[in-house]
Amino acid sequence: MENFDKYKELVNEALDRFLEVKYPERIWESMRYSVLADGKRLRPVMVLEACRICGGNIDTAIPTACAIEMLHAQSLIHDDLPCMDDDDLRRGRPTNHKAFDEATAVLAGDALLSFAPEVIITKTPSVVSDSTKLEVLEAFLVAAGAHKLIAGQVVDIESEGKTVSEETLEFIHKNKTSALFELSLFCGAKIAGASQEKIDALQKYAENFGLAFQIYDDIIDIIATTEELGKTAGKDAKVQKQTYPALYGLEESKNKVIELCKEAKETILANGLESSLLAGILDIIEKRIKK
Ligand code: GRG
């Protein structure tokens, strides 16, 4: 896919640089362990692509792209803890608390959560105005906290073992999953100085993409192996997690993913946002779901 690998390489190189090991080494090693593990880098790639298609210079968005990947890694470290999902495997290797210990994993997550906005403030080139930086920071903090990510996680935990409505399920997905895609596209577009119209279209894409991606993630939890996933397969059913496939079955879930991908694609096309990358990610999900 055009630009994806190039962006991924730029992000990996910058993450490695920003997360240089300092004293005390153990905390930085633990942060690096999870952030630099082999993830798809979807969120930072979206930051850079939004910046490019809105006419910006992608170099100016790299610190924000890295900060969002750090936030994502933090949410995965904490999500895997024994007090939450209690998972042993993530990104094809032992989870942070298994490789280090629980206290270190909690602290590595906390440290990433405060280091990420620090990176936005200290590493964003000065061609980006302070007011834009402030808007990016506000969006970052709103997404990371009780308004979004944590709200989604709390309702998700409360819902385990219960039958929930479609609205509740969408609330969880919108806040746990779509929120970081919305944040990524918003920040990339803002840094490029995009119009409100383009920002709105990207937000709509992110909302539909996020929901499609989460339902797809829940479908592959059922149909793929642990080896293919790099995390424990079949976990959702085991803990009676409320997911779209659990509530509506595989076929209806696949149809929902296809419908959401179609809507997301139409949104970018209708708003003149030419991106083979944003359209290509949707094609990959659709193709895998139809197999
Ligand atoms: C922000 C303080 C604070 C806490 C976070 C734990 C928590 C609260 C939220 C959980 C968020 C979570 C785990 C959402 C799941 C989203 C999801 C589909 C993750 C998998 O994303 P991929 O497939 O993963 O992009 P890779 O490894 O490829 O990056």
Image (cartoon, rainbow, N blue to C red):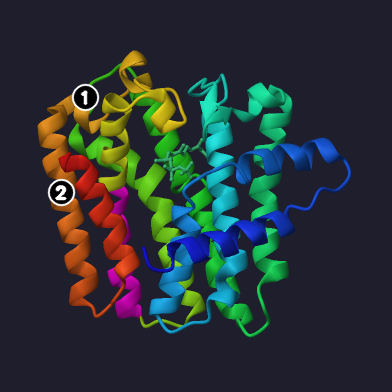
- Residue 8 falls inside the magenta stretch: no
Q: Residue at x 38, y 30 (%)?
A: 156
Count residues near mark 1 (Cα–Cα under 10 Å), then give few for <14, some for 14-19, many for 20+: some
**Which quadrant of the view contains residue 167?**
top left
Residue of label 2? 258
Q: Position of residue 282 (x, y in %)?
A: 26, 56
Residue 219 vs 214, above or below: the answer is above
Q: Residue at x 42, y 70 (%)?
A: 49
Q: Residue at x 50, y 55 (%)?
A: 142
Residue 187 relative to residue 197: left or right: right
Q: Amino acid at mark 2?
A: Ile
Q: Nearer the viewer, residue 208 or 90?
A: 90
For label 1, the SS is: helix
Residue 86 vs 115, above or below: the answer is above
Query: Which quarter of the figure is the N terminus placed in?
Result: bottom left
Q: Position of residue 108 (x, y in %)?
A: 70, 38
For label 2, the SS is: helix
Q: Position of residue 284 (x, y in %)?
A: 27, 51
Residue 181 vs 83, above or below: the answer is below
* Lower sequence index among marks 2 and 1: 1
Count residues near mark 2 (Cα–Cα under 10 Å), then give few for <14, some for 14-19, many for 20+: many
- Residue at mark 2 to residue at mark 1: CA–CA distance: 18 Å
Residue of label 1? 246
Q: Position of residue 116 (x, y in %)?
A: 65, 55
Q: Which residues are magenta?
A: 196-211
